[in-house]
Image (cartoon, rainbow, N blue to C red):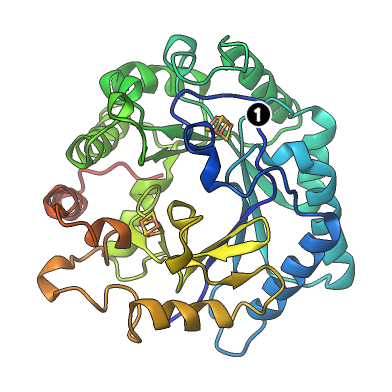
Amino acid sequence: MSGIERVCISVNSVCNLKCTYCYFFLEPDKLPGPKVLSREDLDVILGNVERYGRRAEANKPVKVNFVGSGEPLMEWKSIHGAIAGLRERRPKHTVRFYTVTNGLLLSRKVVRQMRDVGLGPSISLDGPAHIHDATRVRHNGRGSHRATMKGIDALRAEGMPVAINVTMTREVVSNLEEVFDFIQEQGFEKAIFGRLVDVPEEHEVSTAEFYGALRRVAELKAERGLHQLEVGNLEAYRRALSGAPDRVCTMFGSTCGSGFHNIIYMQRDVYPCGRMVGIDRWKLGRFDEPLERFPERMAGITGTSGCGARYAEADRDPAGVDCLLEREREDYDPAPRKVFVQWMGGARDAGRLDRA
Ligand code: SF4
Ligand code: SF4
């Protein structure tokens, strides 16, 4: 077992956008409010992550992703300073850094700084303007597509590859071909298709619709021969089916790792994943504690043998365990993911999947 593989850090709870489905605005009471992790707090967290990555049994670099309940680049100065500071203290550290940003604050200077400290940005972009702007709006209600594309221009001007995070909104799922036309036309290097969860009914995309759309993504990529495009979710399922899953989250990957392999710092508190924030039962500890303590506490909540221990063998599948929160629901239906995994396995064996 590899231990914690992915650490998300939600530095703030403020955003320069007001997307219509964002839980940040829909359930503000769940969030810790305007507290922001300071540069010093981030130094403590990154120091703990780096130490954890050096333990003898570690067999994978730990990935740190600045993402969460706000726009991370609004705190770019602290984030940049903390990553650069870690490199000064530990020049040979193996921690990998990423961020998911709406792109509005990306300038060529920021992009250069990202490149210098080795941080990979991914831009939240839901396809062409009329699809993206249907939900990703500013505080004044206007669409944000143009501003996000300006951020992407800054990445390109600095020769950085463009990775995008597409949220599988109702608009995206209903217009996948058009979203793909746009991705193809733009020549993006990487895309991840994230699930939309815990939203009001009018925004809901069912599990069956999500996995159906993910299958269509794989088919479109193959039909169009988009070899340059890496689709993060499909690669995650491919690795899982080969027996090497990234145990992080089924919202954008293949396999749940909540608490044992995946944790989130929601400012000064630590939880197994972003969907558990604000629920006492799931709180794992404080930001300044050693990482080793969090999986131990998770074992105290869910049982000692790790993810999925409390679930019947029949509920597992070759891609590893499904979302812990969904498995806890009375109306949990494992079928859509099982069908998708079976299809992926068959398509891979028959050579019908396009490889990135
Ligand atoms: S950019 Fe992200 S955090 Fe900001 S409003 Fe949109 S979904 Fe919410
Ligand atoms: S419990 Fe669900 S949402 Fe949380 S990390 Fe696991 S798959 Fe993701």
Please tell me whether mark 1 sits on a helix, a strand or a loop: loop
Residue at x 38%, y 52% (from the top left corner): 253
Q: Residue furthest bottom?
A: 56
Callout 1 amino acid: Gly
Picture coordinates of residue 304, whole percent (x, y): 35, 86
Picture coordinates of residue 175, whole percent (x, y): 30, 18
Whether residue 128 sits left or right of residue 76 in the image: it is left
Q: Is mark 1 within 8 Å of ligand 1?
A: no
For the image, the number of numbered tags is 1
Q: Dividing the image into 4 quarters, which one contains the N terminus?
A: bottom left
Q: Quadrant of residue 7?
A: bottom right
Whether residue 227 sits left or right of residue 340 in the image: it is right
Residue at x 23%, y 61% (from the top left corner): 327
- In front here: 296 or 151? 296
Picture coordinates of residue 43, whole percent (x, y): 81, 65
Residue at x 19%, y 51% (from the top left corner): 337
Residue 84 in the image: above or below residue 259: above
- Can the viewer see residue 120? yes
Whether residue 205 sits left or right of residue 93 in the image: it is left
- Can the viewer see residue 61? no
Picture coordinates of residue 155, whole percent (x, y): 70, 30
- Residue for badge 1: 103
Q: Quadrant of residue 193?
A: top left
- In front here: 129 or 347? 129
Q: Dividing the image into 4 quarters, which one contains the C terminus?
A: top left
Query: Would you call the spot at circle 1 few (<14 residues within 10 Å), some (14-19), or many (20 or more)?
Result: many
Q: Quadrant of ligand 2?
A: bottom left
